[in-house]
């Protein structure tokens, strides 16, 4: 079962996905996107094959996931590798 904060960030990511104007690509290589979030702007970067965000939630929870990363993963799905997001509690791949 997902923790309640994960439900919240997934819902927020869905809202962001419905508003493409929130995503501003600032660099192609590496892919760098400014996300105009509900509480300010955040930068998501594709670094070493992983999406990383400068928001407090991404850094402090240590789960490797936030609504901004999920939104970028969806909005730029053609440029983002399929394993660029770490899902907490996912079974390890074998």
Image: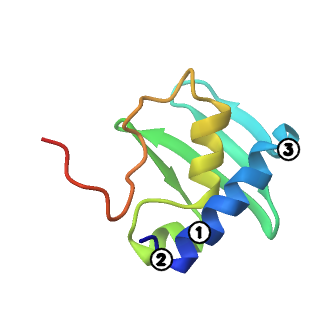
Graded by Cα atoms within 10 Å as few (under 14), some (14 to 19) or many (20 or more), the crowding at tag 2 reads few
Numbered disc in front, either 1 or 3:
1
Q: Position of residue 2 (x, y in %)?
A: 46, 70
The location of residue 90, given as percent across then percent down, is 31, 57
Q: Secondary structure at mark 1?
A: helix
Tell me residue 65's x, y (percent). Answer: 48, 59
Mark 2 — residue?
3
Q: Quadrant of the N terminus?
A: bottom left
Front in this rendered view, residue 55 or 10: 10
Q: Residue at x 72, y 51 (%)?
A: 14
Residue 54 lies left or right of residue 93; in this view the side is: right
Residues marked 1 and 2 touching at CB (< 8 Å)? yes
Above-or-below relation of 92 to 8: above
Horizontal side, residue 49 vs residue 40: left or right: left
**Vertical placement of residue 33 versus 4, above or below:** above
**Label 3 element class:** loop
Q: Is residue 35 left or right of residue 51?
A: right
Element carrying mark 2: loop
Q: Which residue is mark 1?
A: 7
Label 2 and label 3: CA atoms lie apart by 25 Å
| Of the image marks 2 and 3, the number of the one nearer the N terminus | 2
Cα distance between the residues tagged 1 and 2: 7 Å
Q: Which residue is mark 3?
A: 19
Residue 77 appears in which quarter of the rendering?
top right
Total marks in image: 3
């Amino acid at each position: 079962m997902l923790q309640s904060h994960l439900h919240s960030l997934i819902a927020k990511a869905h809202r962001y996905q419905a508003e493409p104007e929130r995503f501003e690509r600032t660099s192609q290589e590496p892919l760098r996107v400014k996300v105009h979030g509900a509480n300010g702007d955040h930068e998501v970067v594709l670094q070493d094959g992983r999406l990383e965000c400068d928001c407090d939630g991404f850094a402090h929870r240590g789960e490797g996931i936030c609504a901004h990363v999920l939104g970028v993963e969806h909005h730029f799905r053609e440029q983002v590798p399929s394993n660029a997001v770490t899902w907490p509690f996912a079974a390890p791949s074998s």
